[in-house]
Image (cartoon, rainbow, N blue to C red):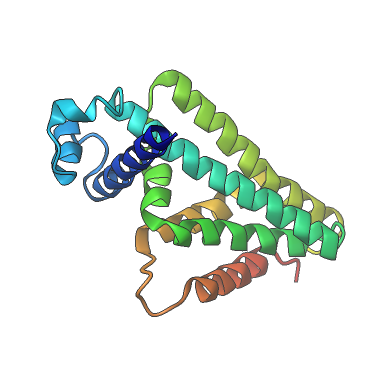
Amino acid sequence: MVQVVVEASRRRAIEDVASDLFRKHGYAATSIRDIAGALSMQGPSLYAHVSSKEDVLWAIVDRAAGRFENAAQLAEERADERHAGDPVEAIAALVRAHVGVVTGDVGEASVFVHEWRALGDDRRAAVLDRRDAYEARFRRRVTDGIAIGVFGITDPAIAATVILSALNGVASWYDPNGRLAAERVADHLVGLTLRMLSSE
């Protein structure tokens, strides 16, 4: 049992270091030797814990995707409990959830947003399916808002893409030590999103 915990801890350390390097230099420009060096390990020693650089990227991307999915699911459930079927509250909750995941681990979120295309065909297709399902949450709520007149007439797919592009962009500029706390960033993005969608 101790060995399993140690191995899981070492694997997570590798992924965390790799995430930082992928974010700073890009996946393609980062080698296994770079990752090993940042951990004061020899390159061959790293292969005792991971089978390939792509496996490390996949672990990071898969974990980040799960965080986004779980946060969105919880946000929608809570919004529906408090404001049954209100698309404005649901969109606001989805925006806050997304910003929360990004600002909670900017490095991992940045790798997810920018580097997933470096995955092999099967893994890339799996990510695309998950991204589409995630985006569908936003499309559905925009469609609901248009139907009851609280959102202006627009293409829900384009609206969802624009919203998520803005939210994903937070990974490129957010600074945990910067001028605005994560909650205030979320406030601003909720406001901008709702003004963009407003029917008024």
Going by the picture, which residue comes out furthest to the top? 122
Whole-percent x and y of residue 115? 36, 39
Horizontal side of residue 18 vs 80, given as left or right: left
**With respect to residue 1, does 85 lie above or below?**
below
Q: Quadrant of residue 97?
A: bottom right
Q: Nearer the viewer, residue 129 or 58?
A: 58
Whole-percent x and y of residue 50? 30, 27
Going by the picture, which residue comes out furthest to the front? 2
Quadrant into which the N terminus falls = top left
Horizontal side of residue 182 vs 42, given as left or right: right
Horizontal side of residue 70 vs 164, given as left or right: right
Whole-percent x and y of residue 121? 42, 20
Q: Quadrant of residue 113?
A: top left
Q: Is residue 158 visible?
A: no
Q: Going 44% across and 38% down the picture, which residue do you hit?
A: 61
Q: Is residue 124 visible?
A: yes
**With respect to residue 110, does 131 lie above or below?**
above
Quadrant into which the C terminus falls = bottom right
Q: Nearer the viewer, residue 7 or 32?
A: 7
Going by the picture, which residue comes out furthest to the bottom? 179
Whole-percent x and y of residue 181? 46, 76
Q: How many marks do you count on the picture?
A: 0
**With respect to residue 171, does 67 lie above or below?**
above
Q: Going 53% across and 26% down the picture, which residue do you hit?
A: 126
Q: Going 54% across and 61% down the picture, which residue do you hit?
A: 100
